Amino acid sequence: MKTSNETKEKVVVIGGGVAGLSAGVYALKAGFEVEIYEKNKIPGGECIGWNRKGYHIDNCIHWLTGTRKGTELYDVWKTVGALTDETEYAPLDAFYTSTYNGERATLWNDLKKTEEELIKLSPEDEDEIKKFIRYVEYSKQCLFPAAKPMEMWGIRDYIRMGINMKDFPKVMKEFGKISLEDYSKRFKSPLLQKLMCDYLPKSYCAYSFLVSYATMADGNGNIPMGASLQMSLRMEKKFKELGGVIHYGCGVNKINIEKKMATGIELEDGSFVKADYVIPTVDTGLLFGKFLSKDYMPKELKTAYENEKAYPATSGFQVAFAVDKNFNRSGEMSETVFIDIEPIKVGNRSFDRMYVKAYGYDPVCVKDDKQVIQTCITQTDEDYYFWKSLSKEEYEKVKTALANEVAKHIEKAFPEIKDSMEYLDAWTPLTYERYCNAYHGSYMSFVTTPYGKQIKMKGQLKGIKNLYVAGQWTNSPGGLPVAVASGKFAVQRILKKQHRDINI
């Protein structure tokens, strides 16, 4: 480490998304000079939104893990400027609603209310429903450890985790190796079967779904008002206030490696930026193959890329509309409602379920007498290949036709909004690939299924001494919690190497 009389050591961060901004803030707090290089014109990566016809479309946050004060993850969100103790959250009281054959079931944040509603709907499933609620309660103990990387844990850390998560091993034993599709078959009610498979891809391990619902029910998965982009802008503001510099419209060609050291990065315009440390926060499909040789890729990642069935990617075909601002504001259902539809064909696959989410709870997504609603049909690797096979003209034609089909299904399910619906935008897995260089257009990292192991990268690569990987792809299934914590962890790993205090 350089002395205080010398120029500060320089950390170069690739990517201005949540992980990159987090790494930047923590590196500045640790006393480094920091520059972030981002290929797009705004911060946030996938944690953004955009405007169409004067309406704001929110791309990211369906729930934000770590909003409960007192958790380690909340402290990270607060440190990077994403949240404050005064942050306002959306006044939502439920996870989502599933409908089928004229009936509906809602997963309320109040677990007792959910239990009573589900038993009333399907008395024959009472025992399985009570078991489900009990295991969701256990899953509240699964809190993301964000104080430091697990390789830095001592015996006390493991003992504390064991005490705090004493019931969660029961969840993993029961649901750690069963898919949501198989788990849903334990219920006799077709509606409850749909309920269990609607929110996450049915190939996901069932425990992921229980943890997601538990996060909402525990008050640890709220939605900050102002939408995703505003949260990213708050992080950017924090980074700049601490003295950081972020360069927009600056794509990277490669990371220069000499004698097992990352000496800096080469930009797309051919210029070179020197660095003492490099923190890439990009999609690992881009990192290994363009920025670095694939020879540096860890074995667990190679396995995942080579086995799509065990490690599928998750994306979506999504459409946004403007509708009457009073739509779905009765409180009888959640803001997210899954509906049955006549099969929609995308490539060689057909889909008979989709959700409609109303954003009227946030003034950012309301204009005059209308609010934004969005839909999503889950896409995976096979669907990505279909979109990728199309010419530009075919792509636009298919996208428009599917958007029209989606509109008809919404009008059929909710005839009261037929006359007020206005098309705003549609996007596909290729949108995420183009904007974020996302592998197969995935907005999460590899799905955790019963056929593959959870990916956990330690952040440092064999053969490079001063490069520390961050980003959601370092820990499946990724998402915002992994992203923001990974930025912090990358800096802590640098400090550990320098024999400095990692508490920043």
Image (cartoon, rainbow, N blue to C red):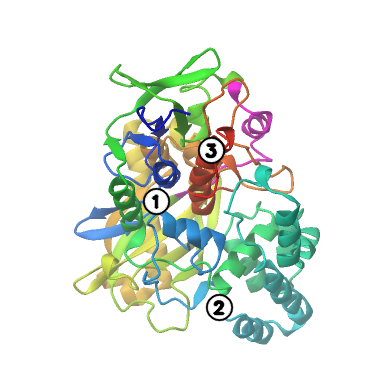
Residue 265 colored in magenta in the image: no
Measuring from the top left, give residue 419's x and y in whole percent.
Answer: 26, 72
User: Which residue in the structure is indicated by mark 2?
Assistant: 108
In this rendering, which labeled residue sits more in front, label 2 or label 1? 1
Characterize the local packing of mark 2: few (<14), some (14-19) or many (20 or more) Cα atoms within 10 angstroms.
many
Kindly state the secondary structure of the residue where label 2 is placed.
strand
Up-down: is 351 above or below 191? above
Q: Earlier in the sequence, mark 3 or mark 1?
A: 1
Label 3 amino acid? Leu
The residue identified by callout 1 is 47
Decide whether residue 297 is among the magenta residues.
yes
Label 1: few (<14), some (14–19) or many (≥20) C-alpha neighbours in 10 Å: many
Where on the picture, by quarter, is residue 208? bottom right
Furthest residue in direction top, as rendered: 259
Residue 49 lies left or right of residue 102; in this view the side is left
| Residue on which the image places disc 3 | 495
128 vs 304, nearest the viewer: 304
